[in-house]
Image (cartoon, rainbow, N blue to C red):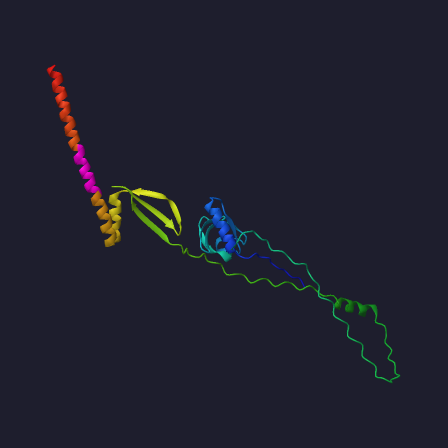
């Protein structure tokens, strides 16, 4: 009989997750490997995948050859690539010969046996040979569907000054890119489109305060400008008199 075995390492342990998280925090490239194939994406078992983020026991990775980020559980990944190994073939031991029939005690009758011819001995020798059994093919696995991302997405709008606003996005605990600056009028339109009264009131209050401060500053600058113009006029008049 021929036996074929496949050696597979266990999934990621809590210590593995801690080590991978430390590598991400240090800015290193962290790589894991798929334990099972994904025929729907043409990915074989053992395909390498770059770790993008870790949220508990869920890892968001980017498999080699796939321009996308997919979530996996820790037991679906492994730290090393392991290839299947084939066990040594074993033969079934030949069957034992049937014991000769016992002769009743006290019987003096003997039974003569004729030697078998060469043509009869050959089939018996062949019958003692065992043919190795062929291994049964493993049942095909159904295509595995990528899991939908469970990490929450957060959009934060922040007022950073009298008229400056920024928008930042977080995917789970990981921030996506740098905050983007937006104008106050775009923030106001966005709040009115959402229709949340509390958000509209808060944003309008900040914008109104910024508007009042800008108007006051304009008045102050206008007064300073008029004062400067008057001083210049006096200087020019004095120069003409001389």
Residue at left offset 18%, top offset 33%:
221
Q: State the image coordinates of residue 111 (x, y, percent, origin top left).
A: 86, 80
* Start-end of magenta stretch: 210-221
Q: Which sits in the foreground, 72 or 144?
A: 72
Q: State the image coordinates of residue 115 (x, y, percent, origin top left).
A: 85, 72
Q: Residue furthest bottom?
A: 106
Q: Which sits in the foreground, 57 or 127?
A: 57
Q: State the image coordinates of residue 11 (x, y, percent, origin top left).
A: 53, 56
Q: Is residue 87 left or right of residue 226?
A: right
Q: Is residue 151 left or right of residue 40?
A: left
**Can you say which quadrant of the picture contains the N terminus?**
bottom right
Residue 192 visible in rendering:
no
* Residue 231 in magenta stretch: no
Q: Which sits in the foreground, 11 or 98?
A: 11
Residue at left offset 14%, top offset 24%:
231
Residue 121 visible in rendering:
yes
Looking at the picture, does residue 241 appear above or below residue 58? above
Q: Which sits in the foreground, 204 or 83?
A: 204
Place residue 87 in its image quadrant.
bottom right
């Amino acid at each position: 009989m021929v036996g074929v075995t496949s050696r597979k390492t266990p999934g990621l342990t809590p210590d593995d997750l801690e080590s991978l998280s430390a590598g991400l925090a240090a800015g290193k490239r962290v790589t894991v490997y798929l334990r099972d194939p994904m025929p729907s994406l043409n990915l074989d078992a053992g395909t390498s995948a770059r770790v993008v983020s870790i949220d508990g026991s869920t890892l968001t990775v980017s498999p080699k050859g796939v321009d996308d980020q997919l979530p996996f559980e820790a037991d679906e990944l492994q730290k090393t690539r392991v290839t299947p190994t084939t066990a040594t073939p074993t033969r079934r031991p030949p069957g034992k010969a049937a014991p000769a029939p016992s002769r009743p005690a006290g019987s003096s009758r003997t039974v003569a046996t004729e030697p078998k011819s060469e043509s009869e001995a050959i089939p018996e020798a062949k019958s003692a040979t065992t043919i190795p059994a062929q291994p049964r093919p493993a049942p095909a696995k159904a295509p595995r569907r990528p899991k939908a991302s469970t990490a929450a997405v957060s959009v934060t709008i922040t007022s950073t000054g009298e008229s400056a606003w920024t928008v930042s996005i977080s995917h789970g605990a990981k921030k996506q890119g740098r905050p983007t600056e937006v104008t106050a009028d775009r923030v106001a339109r966005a709040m009115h489109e959402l229709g949340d009264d509390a958000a509209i009131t808060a944003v309008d209050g900040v914008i109104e305060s910024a508007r009042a401060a800008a108007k006051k500053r304009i008045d102050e600058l206008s007064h300073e400008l008029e004062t400067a113009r008057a001083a210049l006029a006096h200087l020019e008049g004095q120069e003409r008199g001389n």
